[in-house]
Image (tube, rainbow, N blue to C red):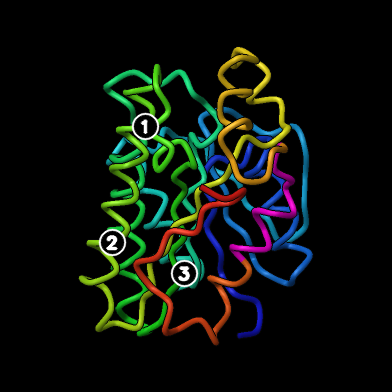
Amino acid sequence: MANPITLITGTRKGIGKHLAEHYVNEGHIVIGCSRGDIDWQLNNYEHFMLDVSDENKVKQLFSSIRKQYGRVDNLINNAGIASMNHSLLTPDVVGTFLFCREAAKLMKKTKYGRMVNFTTIAVPLKLEGEAAYVASKAGVKALTEVLSREYAEYNITVNAIGPVPIETDLIRSVPKDKIQKLLDRQTIHRLGLLEDVTNVIDFYLKAESSFITGQTLYLGGV
């Protein structure tokens, strides 16, 4: 597809910023969003400021996309992945659900779409001391599986990636012992790379991946 329209949440820095840069370089028109403004620029990139759990703001974002482009081809729900200090009122599941629902409305019209959600390796490892965080990300995994069935008839795939900790600014506030607990229990005992993440998402977004849906691919081994 020439110049796919790709929407990525949480693009201000870290993994989201890397994804925005990566897909612009791949020829995509990228729409990004975050709660704060960005201090960088990219050609073929448009930024919106909003909280992903604010339903009205999310609807306004999709209204803008519909008016300007008439479609969205790819959705990458990255927002919130790096924090391990979530409360039980985490916006992860709510935000992921809202973006998937609104994106599906556009994707149904074109009978094409790729959605990628972010969970974490802490879910299958059942990381002790992180009940709220793990529960919220397990909810994203379950949502991915249900939506994959609901959207299949429209040629929309819904998959998830479960990264290990990635070396970005966002994990520097997480206590080192929490990070080390995860690294010790992975099959491959190292931090993830940004390229490890894009490798999986590239696979999910490929047109040839139309038979892959409802799956969660964990990095690092579990």
> Taking the image as drawn, is residue 59 in sight?
no
Image quadrant holding the N terminus, namely bottom right
Query: Disc 3 marks which residue?
Result: 72
Alpha carbons under labels 3 and 1: distance apart: 30 Å
Residue occupying image coordinates x 50% and y 59%: 217
Q: Is residue 206 above or below residue 141?
A: below
In the visual, does 200 lie left or right of 156?
right
Q: Quadrant of residue 106?
A: bottom left
Query: Disc 2 marks which residue?
Result: 145
Image spot of residue 136 (x, y percent): 32, 34
Check disc 1 and give the amino acid type.
Val
Residue occupying image coordinates x 30% and y 33%: 135
Query: Disc 1 marks which residue?
Result: 134
Stretch of the chain drawn in magenta: 191-201
Q: Quadrant of residue 119?
A: top left
Q: Nearer the viewer, mark 3 or mark 2?
A: 2
Check disc 2 and give the amino acid type.
Glu
Q: Are marks 3 and 2 in contact (CB under 8 Å)?
A: no
Q: Main secondary structure of the magenta part?
A: helix
